[in-house]
Amino acid sequence: MASAIRGSRVGAGPMGEAERGDQIERSVVLYWCGKGHETPVSFAVEESVVIPDQWDCPKCGLPAGRDRNNTPNAVVNVPYKTHLAYVKERRTDAEGKKILEDALRKLRGEDDE
């Protein structure tokens, strides 16, 4: 007995471009990171598509630009600052020393109020 689905497997998809429809026209844009990695990215060719100036390099994570000779700089990641670091930005060493002396004098009961 011959089968109509001979040569196919269960769950097989459509057989050819005609069943899937036509693909949209695309253009390939090249991006380069600071380490020289080249990244081709495919974009649809339509009026509404905005091609970004930068793209993250999939190999190293650095920002990549469209100009091979002028790659974008990496973003500097500032570490978390402690409360003490913020205080040191607002106060000079002399101010900090005076505040400490006043607090110690108050704790010792030497405060003249």
Image (cartoon, helix red, strand yellow):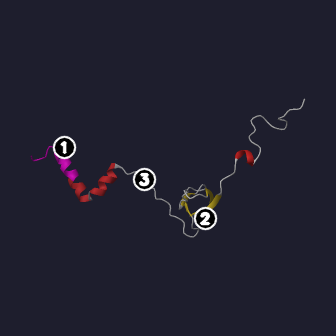
**Chain part drawn in magenta:** 99-113
Front tag of 3 and 2: 2
Q: Nearer the viewer, residue 94 or 79?
A: 79
The answer to which of 113 and 20 lies nearer the viewer is 20
Cα separation between marks 3 and 2: 27 Å
Q: Quarter holding the N terminus?
A: top right
Q: Nearer the viewer, residue 92 or 111?
A: 92
Q: Position of residue 17 (x, y in %)?
A: 74, 48
Q: Which residue occupies the foreground of this view, 111 or 41?
A: 41
Q: Is residue 111 magenta?
A: yes
Q: Which mark is residue 107?
A: 1
Q: Residues within 10 Å of mark 1 (few under 14, many from 20)?
A: few
Q: Amino acid at mark 3?
A: Pro
Q: Would you say the magenta stretch is mainly helix, strand or loop?
A: helix
Q: Is residue 72 above or below residue 104?
A: below
Q: Residue at x 64, y 60 (%)?
A: 28
| Kind of residue at badge 2 | Gly
Q: Which mark is residue 79?
A: 3
Inspect this view and state whether residue 37 appears: no
- Point out residue 36 in the picture as x, y percentages from the top left corner: 61, 64
Q: Secondary structure at mark 1?
A: helix
Give coordinates of residue 85: x percent, y percent.
Answer: 34, 53
Residue located beneath label 2 in the image: 36
